[in-house]
Amino acid sequence: MKIKAAVLHLVFALSAFVIAAETPDQIIKKIESNFNKFGIMQITFNETYLWSLTGEKNSTNGVLLLKGKDKFKVTTDDQIIVSDGKNLWTYSKPSKRVVIDKLKKNDNTLLPRKIFLTYTNDYQSFLKGSEKINGKECWVIKFTDEKGDKLFPELTVWVDKEEYFPRRIEQKDLSNNTTVFTILDIKTEIETTDRDFIFSVPEHVQVIDLRTL
């Protein structure tokens, strides 16, 4: 009876694991569904960049306001980047200079939305396991470039098992430098207007307008 009971417990445990363990494709589809469901999001993040050759590390916190596919505002300690979907303003606080350009939507332009969803296409994925990020239990998925033509040939994404949002994204570029985005907070019930995605140039700031070039 004890052996039979032990076998039943083992079968039950294995069955529960099979049911709980999702495939990377299933997880990715749920992430995409979440981003499509919430038209407006405010994401507080930490970005850490590590240079491979020198070991030097640079870290900054910021807030991303995201609306639709290409309207966004990124605010950090020394920079503000704003797009209304057509124009792109990049304001450097230390240099008091703003560069205005047309928003380019080609494959090499890493828009904020692409940071969270770029790995959904043209990457081979496999599930590495699970880890906790800021107290959140997450799936760990590794992505590798199938075609060999991506700016980031290797990515690792930690996905919240309950909410199905990325909690951390680690990108390695062609020079093996690493960028890590850690999501600190996500808000989805945000009220915005179109004015939030147009940069108002402060006084006494140098303006470089590249839209007519």
Image: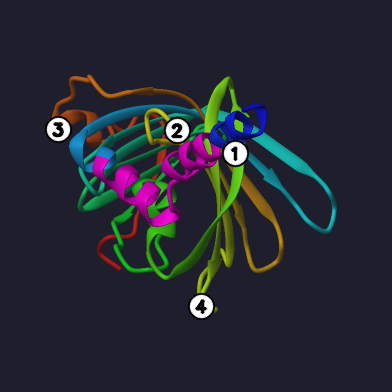
Could you tell me how far apart the alpha carbons at marks 3 and 4 are, in whole angstroms? 35 Å
Out of 105 and 172, give the one closest to the viewer. 172
Res. 149 mark: 4
- First of labels 3, 4 by sequence position: 4
Could you tell me how far apart the alpha carbons at marks 1 and 2 are, in whole angstroms? 9 Å
Residue bearing mark 1: 130
Q: How crowded is the residue under tag 4: few (<14 C-alpha within 10 Å), some, or many (20+)?
A: few
Out of 77 and 139, give the one closest to the viewer. 139
Residue bearing mark 3: 194
Quadrant assignment, res 191: top left
Please state which amino acid type lies under the numbered disc 4.
Asp
Q: How crowded is the residue under tag 2: few (<14 C-alpha within 10 Å), some, or many (20+)?
A: some
Residue bearing mark 2: 161
Q: Looking at this rendering, what residue extends furthest in the front direction?
A: 1
Residue stretch in magenta = 11-33
Out of 145 and 70, give the one closest to the viewer. 145
